[in-house]
Amino acid sequence: MSREAILSRIKTSLSGKATDKKRKDAVASRLAAHAKGVVPASQDNGAGVVDHFVRKAIESVASVEVVKRSMAGKAVTRFLRDHNLPQSIRCGEDARLKKIEWPKTGGPQVLSGPSDGSDLAGLSHALAGVSETGTLILTSGPDNPTTINFLPENHICIIEASDIEANYEAAFAKLRRKHRGGNIPRTVNMITGPSRSADIEQTLIYGAHGPVRLHIIVVKD
Amino acid sequence: MVEITSPAFKDNSTGALADVNLQKAMRHVRVNFIEKRAKAAAALPEFDDLRSSARAIKDHVLDHLDLYLEAYEAKVTERGGHVHWAANAIEARGIVLDICRKVNAKTATKGKSMITEEIGLNDFLEKNGVTPIETDLGEYIIQLRGEHPSHIIAPAVHLTMDQVREDFRKAHKHLPADRPLNEPQSLLLEARGILRDRFLKADVGITGANFLVAETGSSVIVTNEGNGDLTQILPKVHIVVASIEKIVPTLEDMSQIVRVLARSATGQEMSVYTTLSTGPRRKGDPDGPEQYHVILLDNGRSTMLGNEFRDMLRCIRCGACMNHCPVYQSVGGHAYGWVYPGPMGSVLTPALIGIEKSAHLPNASTLCGRCESVCPMQIPLPKLLRHWREREFEQHLTPASVRFGLGIWAYAAKRPALYQRMTGFTMGMLRFLSGGRGRFRWLPLAGGWTKHRDLSAPQGRTFMAQWKAKQARISK
């Protein structure tokens, strides 16, 4: 009822525009083309996307370390210890996280599945990073519960150095390659720093409803 | 429903200017927002090119809005979501309630959303047995106070920390009365603790949308606190309320606008969370909602598309226009008397509720043009305000005294010889009457001005007289 009424009012308001065929073609080609528009030039001064990503992520008040892949488990353990957190971490069944080599002794207890809000620390793996603003891109799926990215006070996120792209456009191209036909996962999170609010007298405070800390571990060979 | 007090803008403003707390709170707007935006814009060489690009995207969408809405609807449905169409606020509220009732919802958490303010959703749900819970810190504070947002992205910007502390002490009786709440940090922690439990127990989550992506069928919210995300992943039902002009074609188009949105709003390069939600949870997903509904609201926008206010449909609700508006900075958002304040509100409100209910708003501006100069979507706000002033005049909504004065002026202005004699005479008289002081403390019919400040007396000759003299010199 209202659907037809709204669409017909829109058509009336747009009368005098190009023919229907022309308009339909314009929309179809626009949706298929993924035209990029204005993409800001890299401001990395030749340092490369990874270095620039690290710099921008730190500016967004995330903490970042770059480690060898074999050292990721140690990095997580160290983060928990440095922040006086229990050695316990919540994470999904992601194969990339399953491969983490945990320290033989003193490593965290690894809890699987979504978070119910009682976990102090969560661990997830990013699909991509965006060097432009130090942004992480995470996707939901059977092995990647979104609750882990938001409920625990401490969010640790692992990202492959080779998955760091210069800009959003390149990251979205990666997303499309992985999920054909535009069938993207239920939730795609673009995360830039820990949660914050400036709602009281414009005073910026970190740790609003999402994580108080965001720790990014960039892994490479 | 927000009671409309826009016609009382003048009285509202007088009250606002005398409100000590409000004036103290508004100081932060005058400094923070403006400096941060300027810095963010300057740090990105392509900023102005991106504004033009963002504008072109929205113009293209508006030219093809019917087709994009159909394409978007098809994608949402393909992904297992439901699309509902609402012609007005009443229909939209009804659809939300219907969805809530079908799942026996008792509580609904809410992400920050201006559109649910526009449709008066909270009061309606409350009256019908569903408790709405605002979860954005600012929204939570004003819900406790029974107020409405005074700013589209900083809803509690009109309050001081002292006021918030008192509200929390009154509302959170179960906590020790002597707890120290001397820092914004401790207030935030308290709200976080209280709301966390409500997030986990809510039956329905309601969010707005910054964008609807036609390519993927996604709704997108851009936030900093993470409350919007908890709202859309924890409850078993996620309802999105969005107006029809929120469409963007592709993820790349969204990226163009995202790059100007946060910079214009808070001066951040990127807000903390930009989240795409597409349909309900997928097979095998361990979390996420089981139902996903999008309500597409028209509420007058399809008509705006065909008239002189169409440019307003490009608005992305960043708030830059109000942050930079000398009138908004002085009187705050509540004086505007309805949901949307500041320059964007003065243009949008008459289109949504009628100029007869919002007369005065188009006049709540000096037309200084700062709003247009910072608008990321290049909306010609002063021009649109002038269009409303014309309509106001055409519909005889302008006060009789103003119409009378304008009538005299129009009579003279259409008769150049008479006009020049009159202005020449008036200037001479005023110069004489000011007695060489160059200003007036008082002048008949100018009480509205001279009550608050002196009026400068004209010096020298009229423009026309000077022009004639200059032409005569040149031709010699």
Image (cartoon, coloured by chain):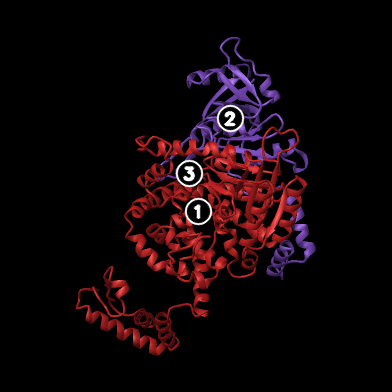
Chain colours: A purple, B red
Amino acid on which the number 1 mark rests in the picture = Ile
Distance between the alpha carbons at the discs numbered 2 and 3? 34 Å
Describe the element under mark 2 as helix, strand or loop: helix
Residue B24 position (above or below residue A212): below
Residue denoted by label 3: B137
Q: Which of pointers 3 and 1 lies earlier in the amino acid sequence?
A: 3
The foreground one among B46 and B371 is: B371
Frontmost of labels 1 and 2 is 1
Task: Pinpoint residue B179: horizontal percent, then vertical percent.
Answer: 36, 34
In the image, taking residue A28 as reference, residue B109 lies left or right, namely left
Disc 3 versus disc 1: distance between alpha carbons? 14 Å
| Horizontal and vertical percent position of residue B420 | 37, 86
Check disc 1: other Cα within 10 Å, few if <14, some if 14-19, many if 20+. many
- Which of the pair A178/B23 is nearer the observer? B23
- Residue ID for mark 2: A50
Q: Is residue B305 left or right of residue B176?
A: right
Do the residues at pointers 1 and 2 share their chain?
no
Q: Nearer the viewer, mark 2 or mark 3?
A: 3
Q: Residue at x 71, y 63 (%)?
A: A2
Amino acid under disc 3: Leu
Amino acid type, residue under disc 2 in the picture: Val
Q: Is residue B391 above or below residue B58?
A: below
Q: Is residue B199 above or below residue B372?
A: above
Please give the name of the residue rendered at 53% of the width and 75% of the height, measured from the top-left corner. B391
Horizontal and vertical percent position of residue B11: 38, 67
Does the CB distance between marks 3 and 1 fall below 8 Å? Answer: no
